């Protein structure tokens, strides 16, 4: 006879999650971020209180940003551990949809558990309920469907017996990894059910390493041997596969230069002689030159985002071919690539064995040295009198660079700094964290907290512009309460400087981006130092670049977040590198500036080509 235990569905869910383990003996779901409301407070809230530290609960300030913290944690842990996030039904749930999309685009594991409508429908419509006039099964949580890898609605207590194992299967699958949504009907959370005791036995989830088809590896080896100008594009999959050493060894053994995407940057130190920086729109000159001339592009763990490929106008060699080593066939077959479906570390090892002592032809190394000289020049401390001078973003990056060490991790997500950091930051190994799959404004502060929670031994430096800081900053209070220290470098250029520059480049008028160009009665007087202090952070304003360097070093001694505000010039870009990006320009109806921009667009678009 099957032994059972009588629990509410909410109690069963948290009990089961508390015994899902990693190979290292830790919980895969370390804990749960929660903001309670009707829809999760009575059922799931009481269950989380009851289980205590066996599955700890943390309070956030905003449903979206506490999910961002969970995402940053999972990324820092290389998808080996994750967090769950729960909210009430209604706006609490839909606040998390943006975060779910962010996790989906970046292939990162997060378990979303929003409260849902009453399965019994007796009190319908309840407060905040979305009613679909044509479908009685729809709730607000159906908005999660396109932005998660697996969606399920827990409308009966016994649904957990199948839904929970399916959820963890997705969260731990290196090929299919992404967010999961279990929409939990609020009456079902409180319903009792006799669950089999065996359901709650501890289970170890292993992250598998699928081996590639030998025929695919052989095809790729032939292509590499025939190439005259090959280049490797190293993506985020290299980090998730823990293939950093394998990639470096592969490049060195076979004399193959490599470039790093936003997600892949930091897999190798900038000083590696085969590392030519980043390709594409915000790429280095030496990396883009390699890619423009390459007759063979070898993607490893990259999804070939448009910034990486210069909107597919970067690869100009008429004889170019594309290889894609990836965990999922969807990514491996993009743009007619010759696919290798398998784990990056395993695949590189097998490919290297097939290539034997083969070494690719010599490539230009002087361009790499010239690039480093250029970076040094644009990031150097200003010599001008700062009473009449505002530093550039590049100079701010240089200030942080000069005081950084091997434990420093810089992070960002949106605005000017992602592109500037990609092209200018000289990263130590594992010293870079960028959310640029979704480039979500407001990720930065919460993400910095998530990184520090995952890697407390690291010094986390968060770059954020005034626009993105205004978008979402409330988890600063959470970090203060939990004593999670990190440093925020807040560059104030008085608006959305990055998009303003893009607007100008596309022939547009300066409009609605900088405060000076918006429909307002008076310029805002924003006291970012005072605001950060009001949440309990240590906050100061840097008077100049030298003062910024000093304040970053001083922040290392604190056990709370430090916010350092510095005014910057919104006009200059990075001053180095770059490539055309496909942002559509109006064909007709504009002034001469738009006509010129469209002519430039048409010339650049002629270089767009895919590999199929």
Image: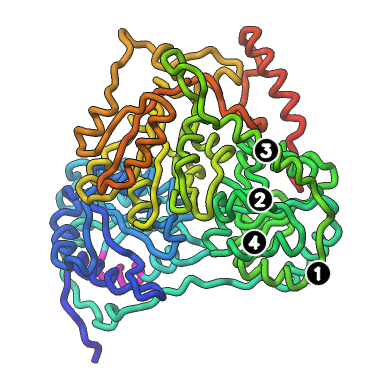
Give the Cα separation between the discs numbered 3 and 4. Answer: 22 Å
Q: Which callout, 1 or 4, points at the residue further toward the start of the chain?
A: 4
Give the Cα separation between the discs numbered 3 and 1. Answer: 30 Å
In the figure, 206 relative to 131: above or below? Answer: below
Magenta stretch: give its range: 156-164
Q: Which callout, 3 or 4, points at the residue further toward the start of the chain?
A: 4
C-beta proximity under 8 Å, tags 1 and 4 = no
Could you tell me residue 362's position as x and y percent?
A: 83, 52
Q: Which callout, 4 or 2, points at the residue further toward the start of the chain?
A: 4
Q: Which callout, 3 or 1, points at the residue further toward the start of the chain?
A: 1
Q: Which callout, 2 or 1, points at the residue further toward the start of the chain?
A: 2
Residue at 63%, 11% in the rendered image: 593
Give the Cα separation between the discs numbered 4 and 2. Answer: 11 Å
C-beta proximity under 8 Å, tags 2 and 3 = no
Front tag of 3 and 1? 3
Mark 1 packing: few (<14 Cα in 10 Å), some, or many (20+)?
Answer: few
The numbered disc on residue 275 is: 2
The numbered disc on residue 247 is: 4
Observer able to see residue 135: no
Residue at 39%, 20% in the rendered image: 494
**Residue carrying label 1:** 357
Q: Which callout, 2 or 3, points at the residue further toward the start of the chain?
A: 2
Helix, strand or loop: magenta stretch: helix
Mark 3 packing: few (<14 Cα in 10 Å), some, or many (20+)?
Answer: many
In the figure, 564 relative to 56: above or below? Answer: above
The numbered disc on residue 195 is: none
Q: Is residue 492 magenta?
A: no
Observer able to see residue 385: yes
Residue at 56%, 49% in the rendered image: 265
């Amino acid at each position: 006879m099957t032994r059972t235990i009588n629990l509410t569905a909410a109690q069963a869910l948290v009990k089961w999650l508390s015994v899902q383990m990693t190979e290292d003996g830790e919980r895969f779901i370390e804990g749960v971020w929660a903001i309670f409301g009707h829809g999760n407070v009575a059922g799931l809230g009481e269950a989380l209180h009851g289980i205590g530290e066996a599955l700890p609960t943390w309070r956030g300030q905003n449903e979206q940003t506490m999910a961002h913290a969970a995402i940053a944690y999972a990324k820092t842990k290389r998808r080996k551990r994750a967090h769950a996030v729960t909210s009430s039904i209604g706006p609490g749930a839909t606040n998390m949809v943006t975060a779910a999309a962010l996790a989906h685009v970046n292939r990162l594991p997060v378990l979303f558990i929003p409260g849902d409508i009453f399965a019994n429908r007796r009190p319908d419509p309840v407060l905040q309920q979305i009613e679909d006039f044509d479908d009685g099964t729809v709730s607000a949580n159906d908005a999660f469907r396109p932005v998660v890898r697996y969606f399920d609605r827990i409308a009966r207590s016994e649904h957990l017996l199948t839904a929970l194992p399916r959820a963890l299967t997705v969260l731990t699958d290196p090929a299919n990894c992404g967010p999961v949504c279990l929409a939990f009907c609020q009456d079902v959370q409180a319903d009792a059910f006799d669950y089999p005791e065996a359901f709650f036995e501890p289970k170890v989830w292993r992250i598998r390493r699928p081996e590639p088809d030998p025929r695919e590896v052989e095809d790729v080896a032939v292509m590499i041997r025939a190439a005259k100008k090959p280049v490797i594009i190293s993506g985020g999959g290299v980090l998730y596969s823990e293939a950093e050493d394998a990639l470096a060894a592969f490049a060195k053994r076979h004399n193959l230069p490599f470039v790093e995407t936003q997600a892949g940057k930091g897999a190798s130190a900038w000083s590696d002689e085969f590392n030519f920086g980043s390709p594409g729109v915000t790429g280095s000159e030496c990396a883009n030159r390699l890619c423009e001339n390459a007759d063979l592009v070898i993607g490893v763990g990259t999804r070939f985002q448009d910034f990486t490929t210069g909107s597919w106008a970067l690869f100009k060699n008429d004889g170019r071919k594309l290889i894609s080593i990836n965990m999922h066939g969807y990514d491996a077959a993009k743009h007619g690539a010759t696919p290798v479906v398998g784990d990056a570390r395993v695949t590189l090892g097998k490919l290297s064995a097939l290539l034997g002592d083969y070494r690719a032809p010599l490539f230009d190394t002087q361009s790499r040295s010239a690039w480093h000289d250029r970076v040094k020049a644009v990031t150097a401390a200003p010599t001008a009198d700062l009473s009449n001078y505002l530093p550039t973003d590049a100079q701010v990056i240089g200030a942080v660079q000069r005081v950084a060490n091997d434990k420093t991790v810089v992070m960002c997500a949106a605005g000017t700094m992602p592109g500037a950091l990609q092209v200018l930051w000289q990263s130590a190994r594992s010293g870079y964290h960028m959310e640029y799959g979704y480039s979500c404004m407001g990720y930065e502060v919460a993400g910095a907290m998530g990184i520090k929670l995952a890697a407390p031994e690291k010094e986390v430096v968060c770059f954020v512009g005034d626009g993105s800081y205004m978008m979402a900053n409330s988890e600063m209070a959470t970090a203060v309460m939990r004593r999670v220290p990190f440093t925020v470098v807040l560059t104030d250029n008085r608006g959305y400087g990055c998009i303003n520059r893009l607007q100008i480049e596309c022939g547009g008028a300066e409009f609605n981006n900088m405060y000076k160009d918006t429909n307002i009665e008076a310029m805002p007087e924003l006291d970012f130092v005072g605001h950060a202090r009001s949440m309990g952070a240590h906050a100061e304003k840097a008077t100049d670049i030298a003062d910024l360097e000093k304040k970053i070093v001083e922040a290392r001694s604190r056990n709370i977040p430090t916010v350092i505000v510095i005014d910057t010039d919104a006009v200059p870009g990075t001053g180095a590198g770059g490539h055309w990006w496909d942002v559509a320009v109006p064909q007709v109806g504009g002034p001469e500036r738009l006509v010129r921009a469209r002519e430039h667009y048409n010339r650049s678009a002629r270089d767009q080509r895919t590999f199929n």
